[in-house]
Amino acid sequence: MIPTARRARAIEQLRPVIERARRFSGWNFDDVGVTPLEPQFPNGLATPWDYVATAREEASRAARVIDLGTGGGEVYSRIALPGETRFIASEEWHINAPVARDRLAPLAVDVVRASSEITPWAEASFDVVLSRHEAIVPEEIIRILRPGGVFVTQQVGKEQWRELESFFPNRTVFPDHFVEYRRAFEAAGLAVTAHYHTWHAAYATLGDIAYMLLVAPWEVPGFDPVRDIDRLLALEDAHGGDQGIVMTLCRYLMVARMPGRR
């Protein structure tokens, strides 16, 4: 049983978090307090791969590149370097599309408001297709790739935040896209390389977790930090400690190459 005073104090502390989440745009979480607990890799990252470096290398050899679901363009702005390559981005959410346009305009990147799952582009339009944490349809990726083209994606893996399942019964159960995407690309004749990694990280406060659940509403549909305060506090009791609230994080990198030459 959660003491009434603790519940009231926690709700009061979460109110600024709720207001901040209502103003959320872009796709930048630098203000969320989260610390990896395992040693970082030689690349300085929590994953053994570097998505930006991989995407940038592929883009350097391409004539046309698109980033599906670019968010606010935060990551793509580090990939779309000046040169002869034509860079395009898509973003469906009406809040983020203008944010991406403003950020990417100085890099001469065209931003189109469009779905990543049913795209408006013609067949064989791109040498490189990128997707970072954006749902895709493999058949659509294959359709818009040119012969010899490559698809590079980093996605959130199935084990992400698995600690939530014990406290939020309505937590979304996502398909295992790591298996499904790979199977679909290989069945179509693409050569696939993939890497999968899980690690633990400590969220500094309960507010950091509540904020993430508010701006990613697909994780726990209908999540309300006030109504769900007892569940949040139970999560904190079970997984909190001196380092913070420890959660599992999970990512994978997949690179799928079309047969042919470009």
Image (tube, rainbow, N blue to C red):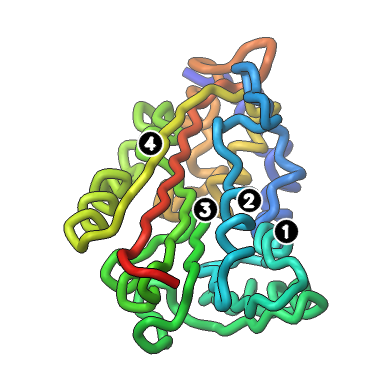
Spot occupied by residue 234 in the image (x, y as percentages of width and height): 49, 23
Circle 1 SS class: helix
Seen from the viewer's position, the closer of residues 9 and 222 is: 222
Q: Earlier in the sequence, mark 3 or mark 1?
A: 1
Spot occupied by residue 29 in the image (x, y as percentages of width and height): 69, 47
Residue picked out by circle 3: 216
Residue picked out by circle 4: 168
Mark-to-mark CA distance, 4 and 1 = 36 Å
Mark-to-mark CA distance, 3 and 1 = 23 Å
Outermost residue to the front: 261
Q: Residue at x 44, y 35 (%)?
A: 160
Q: Which corner quadrant holds the C terminus?
A: bottom left
User: In the visual, does 83 lie left or right of 147?
Assistant: right
User: In the visual, does 38 lie left or right of 31?
Assistant: left
Mark-to-mark CA distance, 3 and 4 = 15 Å
Q: Amino acid at mark 4?
A: Phe
Q: Which mark is residue 78?
A: 1
Q: Earlier in the sequence, mark 2 or mark 3?
A: 2
Circle 3 SS class: loop
Q: Residue at x 53, y 35 (%)?
A: 229
Circle 4 SS class: loop
Marks 2 & 4, CB-CB < 8 Å contact: no
Would you say residue 36 is visible in this rendering?
yes
User: In the visual, does 227 lie left or right of 60?
Assistant: left
Q: Residue at x 22, y 57 (%)?
A: 184
Q: Which mark is residue 52?
A: 2
Mark-to-mark CA distance, 2 and 4 = 33 Å
Q: Amino acid at mark 1?
A: Arg
Badge 1: how crowded within 10 Å, few (<14), some, or many (20+)? Answer: few
Seen from the viewer's position, the closer of residues 100 and 226 is: 100
Q: Amino acid at mark 2?
A: Val
Would you say residue 25 is visible in this rendering?
no
